């Protein structure tokens, strides 16, 4: 039975490590977002300049489209003016030409303003580029290290799952079923706990002296009357703090 207890302890360690690694991998999107958020916070001023540049560029493109349309309307109004055959049509054409020319002038001024804003933003971006390049390099390095760690932890998880299968296969079916039943019922998945200084380290309940003696002998599987975990005794680690169940 001592050999089976050792396998159960090893299985518990393996399952705990699997759970920890799965939690790490599940947190990947959040951890990546935190890295990117840190960059955004440190490069806030630069991003604001980029936004200003992009806004100026978009507005200039729209103004240029409006200008092209207004020029087309002005050309039509001038043709109408040249072909007008009466005073009413002539007056209307004059008014349209005058309005179009004023719009053209306004649009050209606005386009010039946006070009100046665009140029100014690009100059500021150029000035900040070395600093931002450094920040991007730092972020890239963190992301690469993070990706490498992710690959490593994924490999660790695969290895642990293989080891878990081996341990489960080496246990008697009845013992394996007992472990599975306990671990699936308990929230933290800890089905095996150390008995130390007369108490269960998982639930901290005091064990009867007779039960503690049985656990020390290790000749049978003993279940905690309080938390229903499998108990074991480890004389090598009995001097460690009383709070450490198998993790």
Image (cartoon, rainbow, N blue to C red):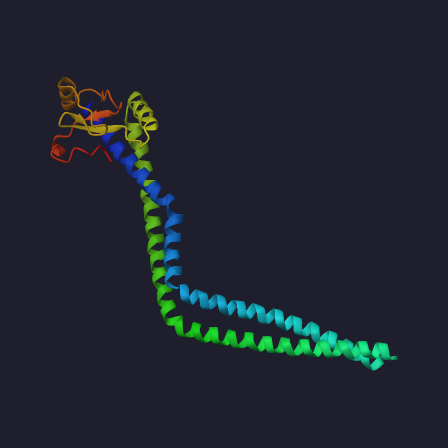
| Residue found farthest to the right | 85
Percent across and percent down for residue 44 are: 41, 63
Q: What residue do we see at 66% from left, 74% from top?
A: 67
Percent across and percent down for residue 52 are: 49, 68
**Image quadrant occupied by the N terminus:** top left
Percent across and percent down for residue 74 are: 74, 77
Q: What residue do we see at 20% from left, 28% from top?
A: 204
Percent across and percent down for residue 15 are: 30, 34
Q: Does residue 42 appear left or right of residue 9 in this picture?
A: right
The foreground one among 235 and 55 is 55
The foreground one among 244 and 45 is 45
Q: Quadrant of residue 243?
A: top left
Q: Does residue 34 appear left or right of residue 118 in this picture?
A: left
| Residue 150 higher or lower than 61, as above or below | above
Across the whole image, how many numbered discs are drawn on residues? 0
| Residue found farthest to the top | 210
């Amino acid at each position: 039975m001592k050999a089976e207890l050792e396998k159960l302890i090893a299985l518990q360690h393996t399952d705990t490590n699997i759970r920890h690694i799965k939690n790490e991998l599940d947190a990947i999107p959040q951890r990546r977002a935190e890295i990117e958020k840190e960059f955004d916070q440190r490069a806030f001023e630069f991003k604001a300049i980029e936004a200003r540049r992009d806004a100026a560029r978009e507005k200039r493109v729209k103004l240029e489209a409006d200008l092209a349309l207004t020029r087309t309307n002005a050309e039509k109004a001038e043709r109408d003016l040249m072909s007008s055959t009466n005073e009413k049509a002539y007056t209307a054409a004059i008014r349209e030409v005058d309005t179009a020319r004023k719009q053209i002038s306004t649009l050209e001024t606005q386009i010039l303003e946006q070009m100046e804003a665009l140029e100014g933003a690009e100059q500021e971006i150029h000035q900040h580029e070395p600093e931002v390049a450094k920040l991007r390099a730092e972020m890239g390095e963190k992301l690469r290290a993070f990706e490498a760690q992710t690959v490593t932890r994924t490999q660790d998880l695969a290895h642990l799952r293989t080891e878990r299968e081996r341990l489960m296969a080496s246990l008697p079916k009845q013992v394996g079923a007992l472990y599975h039943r306990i671990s699936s019922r308990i929230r933290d998945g800890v089905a095996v706990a150390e008995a130390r200084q007369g108490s269960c380290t998982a639930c901290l309940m005091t064990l009867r002296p007779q039960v503690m003696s049985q656990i020390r002998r290790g000749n049978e599987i003993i279940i905690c009357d309080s938390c229903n975990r499998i108990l074991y005794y480890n004389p090598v680690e009995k001097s460690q703090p009383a709070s450490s169940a198998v993790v």
